[in-house]
Image (cartoon, rainbow, N blue to C red):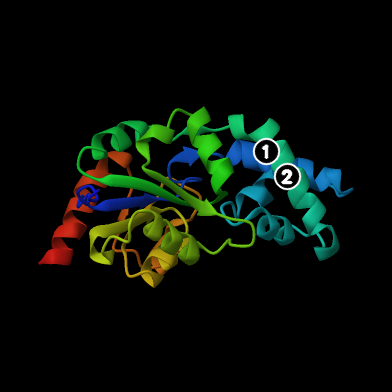
Amino acid sequence: MSAGPVDARPVLLFDVDGTVVDSAPGMVRSLQAAMAAVGLEPAAEGQLRADLGPPPAVMLAGVGVPESLINDAVIAYRAHYRQVGMDRAEAFAGVPEALGGLCAGYRLATATMKLIDTATEFLARHGLRDHFEVVGGARNGVFDKAAIIAETRVALGSPAAENMIMIGDRHSDISGGHSNGLRTIAVSWGYGSRAELEASEPDVIIDRPDQLAEAATRLLQSATA
């Protein structure tokens, strides 16, 4: 039996937290619950919101959870997030419509720091799973954005780097895209500051989801010029 035709459409890789969905309320609540579960005073919401996006262990260490308690705190975080935090989120205004419009001309996938199973369930709960051909994310022991992008690319059939764009709201999204030879779009509506985004040197920064299609078209044309 011969293989089916290769899908030659360009690929758009999306970060999830802070790019597709505003998951901050649930993440903050779950981080606070995790700290309480290991006997620590929960950090203030403002402190936790200052660095959303990295793996839970990194976020918890960043607010003072000692190394000896990190593993138990991460377990508590994930349990609380699945039970409570996952539902305390909503897609950013305009993002579902933008994804729906992009599906005709692009292959869409995620490259998120969430565990793959968590990301799949999370997107399904918020009515977004069907937009993405592949849900790429972290696995236990692999929480590096560049590695996640590389693995997602393989899952998509290893399309050419010049036919792919990474889209995200934090420096790790942009640097991870660059490490894989991808063009990058930074979005300003997420959790990274404008200064952080500019310092990461994306190909373009956009301020609204309805700018995604034009920005992607322009970058892909420049890749083949």
Residues 152 and 23: in front is 152
Q: Quadrant of residue 54?
A: bottom right
**Callout 2 amino acid:** Tyr
Who's the residue at 74% across and 51% down the image?
Answer: 74
**Callout 1 amino acid:** Tyr
- Could you tell me how far apart the alpha carbons at marks 2 and 1 are, in whole angstroms? 6 Å
Residues 134 and 74: in front is 134
Q: Quadrant of residue 197?
A: bottom left
Asked if residue 195 shows in the view, the reply is no
Q: Position of residue 129 (x, y in %)?
A: 43, 34
Residues 104 and 155: in front is 155
What element does badge 2 sit on?
A: helix
Q: In the rendering, which numbered label is found on residue 220?
A: none
Q: Quadrant of residue 26?
A: top right
Q: Position of residue 73 (x, y in %)?
A: 79, 51
Q: In the rendering, which numbered label is found on residue 81?
A: 1
Asked if residue 219 shows in the view, the reply is yes
How many neighbours does mark 1 have within 10 angstroms: few (below 14), some (14-19), or many (20 or more)?
Answer: many
Residues under numbered marks 2 and 1 in contact, where contact means CB atoms less than 8 Å apart: yes
Who's the residue at 60% across and 53% down the image?
Answer: 50
What element does badge 1 sit on?
A: helix
Q: Is residue 133 above or below residue 151?
A: above
Q: Position of residue 107 (x, y in %)?
A: 28, 46
Who's the residue at 73% across and 37% down the image?
Answer: 80
Residue indicated by mark 2: 77
- Quarter holding the C terminus is bottom left
Q: Is residue 135 above or below residue 183?
A: above
Apparent side of residue 193 relative to residue 8 in the rendered image (left or right): right
Instruction: Find the residue positioned furthest to the left.
Output: 225
